[in-house]
Amino acid sequence: MSALPPLVFKLAGDADELDQVQALHYRTFVEEIPQHPPNDARRYVDRFHADNVYVIGKLGARVIATLALRGQRPFSLDSKVPSLDSFLPQGHVPVEVRLLAVEREFRRTAVFAALLEHGVRHALGEGFDLGVISGTTRELKLYRHMGFTAFGPLVGTSGAEYQPMYVTLDRFCENARANPALGKIVQPLLERPNELNFLPGPVTPTPAVSAALAAPPISHRSAEFVEHLRDVRARLCRIARARDVQVLVGSASLGNELIAAQLSLAPSRGLVLANGEFGERLVSQSRRARMEFDVLARPWGAPFELAEVARALERVPAFGWLWFVHHETSTGILNPLRELVAMAHERRVRACVDCVSSLGVVDVDLRHVHLASSTSGKGLAAYPGLALVFHDSQPAPEPQRLPGYLDLGHWASHDSVPHTHSSNLVAALSAALHEITPARMARIADHAHWLRAELAGLGFVLPAPERAACPAVTTLIPPRGVSAFELGEDLDRRGFWTSYRSAYLVERGWLQIALIGDPSRTALEKLVRVLGQIVRRRASVASP
């Protein structure tokens, strides 16, 4: 017996899908519910067809369910319910949900709830937060169960009567998650990435990167893989202007552990700069490696003064080391890479840099940098899982002093393949590197400048000053009375992924919007529009 084709929920796009929608509407609203007169074409074309967005459920090529969303006023209900707005809760942006139709054999199944849920998600993502519907009197119990509130008199005709109803879209989501049956439908959708991904990682990969990851794996011992990895390493070095790089299976933290291990081989005093969460992590990693060093700490969000760094470097002897984060992701600060490296080079101090969130998003120049770390899954826009360690000299293996996995010389002496590697992750990184261009960096910078101005206009406080702000991540503090965590949850329900759950963000009441994945201006405009609506409503509720 052949398996059933997959059930997919999407927006109707091509002519065949729209034709099937109109045929389903005819069977439902002409033949089953005598609401409109019959016609020879056996298609019902809604009078608002040009404005409607149709959400459909497809089983293979067959459309089995549909509903229409329309945000333009006047609504259909405006002509049937005088003073419609007087029945609706204030402070919301309504969308009318109409023409809900499900094929007979799929009624009383999860299809109805999943269709409505998908429509709600789309409406939330477009900035609407109140659904207005004329619910058939045959299904009033179901509508109420899903959080709808009835208002006004019945509309329609005898045999085709409807009850005007509304639901706040937040309440619909809350009801869906609390209901065991609906929760199985709703919860997985909350975990799916989409084009509204504003996380610092993982980013939403491009189709070319996803296709490369999905290719059949090859042996990491094959000549083909070793040559492919050499090519990837060469391109990474060209992007970063570095002499060499090792590609390791692991997270970015592994890259920093290798740097700490390498520095511990030649005991010498160093200096760690810290003005955020990730600078403080470098302090912790240096301590774990039992190195001797000083710390120059600045408040989170405060740029380093170069004169202050110069004074701190006076305590570092020649051939000592300086270690700092280029893009301090926690605050959105971009520390001055060229100036700090030049200062260290002039004093014959080895400069080490964490470029985890900057490589691929801004220009990174690793000339005169002793060691630097990065990763495949952030600014380079591939999948997480590969750590990158750049180095300016050929490290020797240290089998008597370091574990193999933390020995940079061990990796270098085996062309980055001393242990099992992932051809899929390397292939995805290779595909992503083709898309790291100056045009992409300029686009992200332009979007970040626009975003910061829009957020300031909405009353958000931005910890990173404009002169030191990195376009990759914008950290924001919500207006008074608005919780960053609750704001992040509100955005989650609307399909926007932002960063707000990390412990250091929760502790400070901060939220982050990342452009690392190069989201479109359209997606950013949606985010800003929705942010404004949420903040205004929450502020109005909080005010006396």
Image: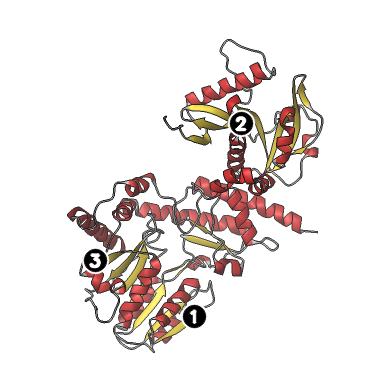
Instruction: Give the labeled residue for mark 1.
Output: 297
**Residue 68: mark in rendering:** 2
Residue kind at label 3, given as amino acid type: Pro
Instruction: First in sequence, mark 1 or 3: give its number.
Output: 1
Q: Tell me the quadrant of the picture where the N terminus can be found.
A: top left
The amino acid sitting under disc 1 is Ala
Residue 125 visible (yes or no)? no
| Label of residue 418 in the image | 3
| In the image: residue 155, left or right of residue 484 | right
The quadrant the C terminus occupies is bottom right
Seen in the picture, residue 400 relative to 240 is either above or below; the reply is: below
Q: Position of residue 14 (x, y in %)?
A: 47, 28
- Label 1 near label 2: C-beta < 8 Å? no
The percent position of residue 71, horizontal first and vertical second, equals 64, 36
Badge 2: residue crowd in 10 Å (few <14, some 14–19, many ≥20): many
Image height of 371 relative to 153, above or below: below
